[in-house]
Amino acid sequence: MRLSHVRSVAAVVALLAAPVALAPALAQDHGERVLRGDLNCDSAVDFGDINPFVLALSDGAAWQALYPGCPLLTGDINLDGAVDFADINPFVALLAGAHLGEVSHTDCWGDVGGRDWCPPDVIQLTVEGSVLHAHHQDAEYNCCFEDIAVTLTVEGNLIRLDEEEIVPDPCWCLCCVDVWATVEGLASGNYTVEYCWFEYGTNQVECYSEDIVIP
């Protein structure tokens, strides 16, 4: 994909009229599973989504009439509850290639009163189209974590996901957590996936590695 093409996308969208806010019901329903950037709902994020994205920004009602049953949340690329100019740069990034998609986690589900020995860590990797789904079961983190962040690095055919707890004020206890992350926009081919996290039991970073195929 030519950089000039990407720049032209941003330039065209920047000329549009006022941003379009999501209806309240949609804005609050981030539990609905959607493929961000798939504005024509063909299960892919590509150049075919550019015109639908422009239409969603300029006239949300016209977009929904043209694509009935397609959630407007597909245009909320930055997950702030609205389809507006703030989604332009993230949308361009989607078109540029592989990117981190949805990241979520459970609350503490183990004993939060002290040192909770969680079951052994399990990393499950599944592929659905151009999307990689990762599930870290039985992660062990500080009970007072504020969030679990996942960062993505793609170098050639190596996909690395690094998991990190965000703990402004640590507590004197650990608990068990499940973490999910997706990598979207992967090109077809063979990849090696490394999923890494800090392991309290060994007091060091541990990594799980697995080869996958994107069809």
Image: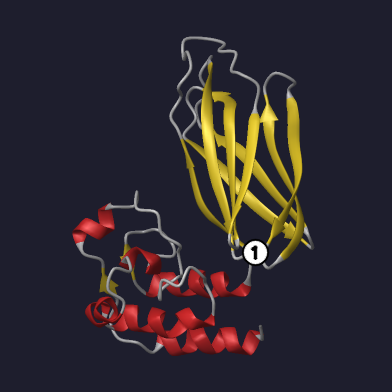
Give the residue at x 40% y 76%. Answer: 40
Residue sticking out furthest to the top: 114
> Disc 1 on helix, strand or loop?
loop
Image coords of residue 93 (percent x, y): 56, 71
Point out the image quarter for the C terminus. bottom right
Give the residue at x 33% y 78%. Answer: 56
Give the left or right position of residue 29, taking residue 185 as reference: left
Give the left or right position of residue 126, taking residue 159 as reference: left
Point out the image quarter for the N terminus. bottom right
33 in relation to 44, above or below: above
Residue assigned mark 1: 186
Give the residue at x 53% y 23%. Answer: 176
Kind of residue at badge 1: Leu
14 in relation to 84, above or below: below
Image coords of residue 14 (percent x, y): 42, 85
Image coords of residue 90 (percent x, y): 50, 69
The answer to whether residue 163 shows anywhere in this view is yes
Question: Residue 41 occupies which quadrant of the picture?
Answer: bottom left
Residue sticking out furthest to the front: 215
Give the residue at x 45% y 90%. Answer: 12
Give the left or right position of residue 124, taking residue 73 as reference: right
